[in-house]
Amino acid sequence: MSVKGHQPRLMVGSPAVYRISVAGRLDPALSDCFADMRIESGEGETGDAEGVTTLIGRLVDQSQLAGVLNTLFERRLPILSVESLLDRSPPASESRSRRTES
């Protein structure tokens, strides 16, 4: 049960959906390098050619988030923002297996 106006507390070992924005472009085919996060490219705020890439997806914990951020660092992509969207739903693979067991 959640109280109106009260967000669930984010825990280091808890799953959550994250939105990460970086300066530059990433090929959506690289999704598997980034924990299967969805990769969306768009224009930068100033309409520059570099653009902004947004990665959105559910990560199992903050350790996996750190791995994604490290991969972005290794590719020399400046991180503009990281936002937790606090999704508490089970991973797609878990929910699929639960449905097939029923």
Image (cartoon, rainbow, N blue to C red):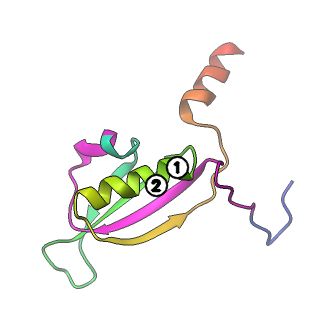
Q: Looking at the image, which residue is at 25% across and 77% down?
A: 44
- Is residue 18 left or right of 94 when viewed as pictured? left
- Which three-letter amino acid code belongs to the residue tagged 1? Ser
Query: To which residue does mark 2 refer?
Result: 66
Characterize the local packing of mark 1: few (<14), some (14-19) or many (20 or more) Cα atoms within 10 angstroms. Answer: few
Q: Looking at the image, which residue is at 58% across and 25% down?
A: 96
Is the Cβ of the residue at disc 2 closer than 8 Å to that at disc 1? yes
Taking the magenta stretch, the answer to whether it contains residue 12 is: yes
Find the magenta span and give its range. Answer: 8-32
Label placed on residue 92:
none
Q: CA distance from mark 2 to mark 1?
A: 5 Å
Mark 1 secondary-structure assignment:
helix
Q: Quadrant of the C terminus?
A: top right
Mark 2 secondary-structure assignment:
helix
Inspect this view and state whether residue 74 appears. yes
Query: To which residue does mark 1 refer?
Result: 63
Q: Position of residue 42 (x, y in %)?
A: 26, 67
Q: Position of residue 86 (x, y in %)?
A: 63, 58
User: In the image, is residue 101 above or below residue 51?
Assistant: above
Inspect this view and state whether residue 40 appears. no
In the picture, residue 92 is in which quadrant?
top right
User: In the image, is residue 90 above or below residue 63?
Assistant: above
Q: Looking at the image, which residue is at 39% across and 41% down?
A: 36
- Which three-letter amino acid code belongs to the residue tagged 2? Ala
User: In the image, is residue 30 above or below residue 55?
Assistant: above
Q: Position of residue 3 (x, y in %)?
A: 86, 65
